[in-house]
Amino acid sequence: PNRVVIKIGSSSLTSLHGEVSRKKLEKLVDQVVALKDEGMEVVLVSSGAVAAGYRKLGFIERPSSLPEKQAAASIGQGLLMESYSELFLSHGYVASQILITRTDFSNENRYYNMSNTINVLLERGIIPIVNENDTVTVDRLKFGDNDTLSAKVAALINADQLMILSDIDGLYTDNPSTNPDAKMLEHVTEITESIEAAAGDSGSAVGTGGMKSKIDAVKISMASGISTFLGKADIPDILIDAVNGNAHGTYFENK
Ligand code: ADP
């Protein structure tokens, strides 16, 4: 694949205390840089704005009310972008920020504007970093993180592959945090009723969508014929391996 969308969840970017981890950001950036060095076009869909901002808003722990999370994201989004920009620049790459809302996809003008903008950025070697515009929409903060948003972005720009990085190494036959007998599936060609039933909520305090919203995302990407990989964010070289088809994780591909 030449054009890929990578989605990373809050739980994969934060430390145990819920703050954004510089180390984890660096590791992600290094992997994206490796793909860029191969000549690939990469769009990053990154969560983490709330995690990057809540302390500066005066909270000791991640706040729980929506307006407080939105306010934290308003501080954190800029800080997160600052870190990304700095890290990518140190490797010679330029990052850009794209804030979108779900309704942007159902407005024809906005749809084409988004697509044109991202195409120009990609053609010029830039790494667009997408997040939901938390000030005006709370969907992501309420449910689903950026899972379905990343699938819509992948469809919008005709990506070859969507990669969803999570705190779990793949899709299991049942929620592995509650069922120790659950088995990981390596290849999925169809989202069946039993897969939908197996996909449960998030097990972590920072994760919001769980496997449910990831399956919703996969339904969107598969409907657009985009192969999708789900894997664990902290496995070394997971992105390069996923692109080459030999990563540990779940591959979703139409038959
Ligand atoms: P992220 O923040 O990385 O997006 P989430 O916490 O939202 O991650 O979602 C991943 C979690 O979903 C897993 O850690 C697991 O607890 C839960 N989960 C529920 N059902 C399943 C399943 N069938 N297979 C794998 N994980 C599942």
Image (cartoon, helix red, strand yellow):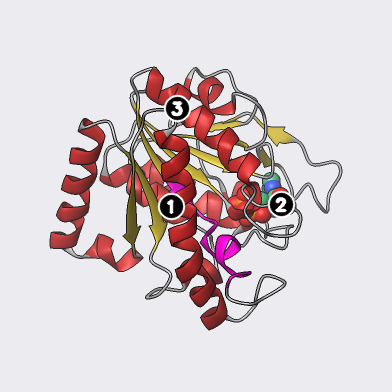
Residue 167 position, x and y percent, is 68, 45
| Residue drawn at (38%, 51%) of the image | 130
Where residue 177 appears, as percent x and y from the top left, is 80, 51
From the image, tell me which residue sits under label 3. Answer: 33
**Quarter of the figure with residue 106:** bottom left
Any magenta on residue 107?
A: no
Left or right of 120? Residue 15 is right
| Mark 1, residue position | 81
| Identity of the residue drawn at 48% across and 38% down | 87
Between discs 2 and 3, the one toward the N terminus = 2
Q: Nearer the viewer, residue 162 or 46?
A: 46
Marked residue nearer the N-terminal end (2 or 1): 2
Three-letter amino acid code at the position of disc 2: Ser
Q: CA distance from mark 2 to mark 1?
A: 18 Å
- What SS does tag 3 mark? helix
Dot 3 or dot 1, earlier in sequence: 3
Q: Which residues are magenta?
A: 45-56
Left or right position of 157 against 189:
left
> Can you tell me whether the CB of the residue at mark 1 lies under 8 Å from the nearest atom of ligand 1?
no
